[in-house]
Amino acid sequence: MDDDKIFEAIEIAKSTGKIKKGANEVTKVVEKGLAKLVITAKDVNPPEIIMHLKPLCKEKDIKLLEVNSKNDLGGAAGLERSTAAVAIVNEGEAKKLIKELSELKE
């Protein structure tokens, strides 16, 4: 999996569409079925913070991708700090890139 491509999708969606940041916000949009793509960080500690997202995304048929670093994920989302999860709610101009990412196998 190419983290750079994922970060690029987040950055494009952030500036031309809509994203949600943080485990709580992401959980809310996934529960409502509004997320187009969910990205979590592998280095979240404790892992319980985002553990529920994988089964929830599976239930709602929303693609979940993982990146290595919560710091990089926060940076891509435009935050000055790290974040455990990001959801792309409106793809904006990242639609094609997100479609590509959604079709990738884990």
Image (cartoon, rainbow, N blue to C red):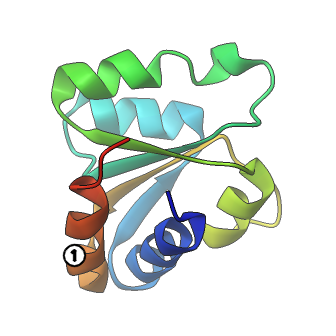
Q: Is residue 94 in sight in this rendering?
A: yes
Point 29% across, 54% down: residue: 104
Q: x and y percent of residue 43 in the render?
A: 76, 36
Q: x and y percent of residue 91 in the render?
A: 27, 71
Q: Is residue 82 in sight in this rendering?
A: no
**Kind of element beneath mark 1:** helix
Q: Looking at this view, is 52 or 68 the one in front?
A: 68
Task: Answer above or below: position of 53 versus 87.
Answer: above
Task: Answer above or below: position of 28 versus 22.
Answer: above
Which image quarter is the C terminus in?
top left
User: Is 49 left, or right, of 72 in this rendering?
Assistant: left
Task: Answer above or below: position of 85 versus 100.
Answer: above
Question: Which of the 4 quarters of the picture holds residue 61?
Answer: top left
Amino acid type at circle 1 is: Lys
Point 36% across, 58% down: residue: 88
User: How many marks do you count on the picture?
Assistant: 1
Task: Answer above or below: position of 39 versus 95.
Answer: above
The residue beneath circle 1 is 95
Mark 1 burial class by Cα count in 10 Å: few <14, some 14-19, many 20+: some
Q: x and y percent of residue 47 in the render?
A: 70, 19
Point 70% across, 48% down: residue: 83
Q: x and y percent of residue 31 in the render?
A: 28, 26
User: Is 28 left, or right, of 52 in this rendering?
Assistant: left
Q: Looking at this view, is 92 or 62 the one in front?
A: 62
User: Is 53 left, or right, of 101 in this rendering?
Assistant: right
Point 32% across, 39% down: residue: 29
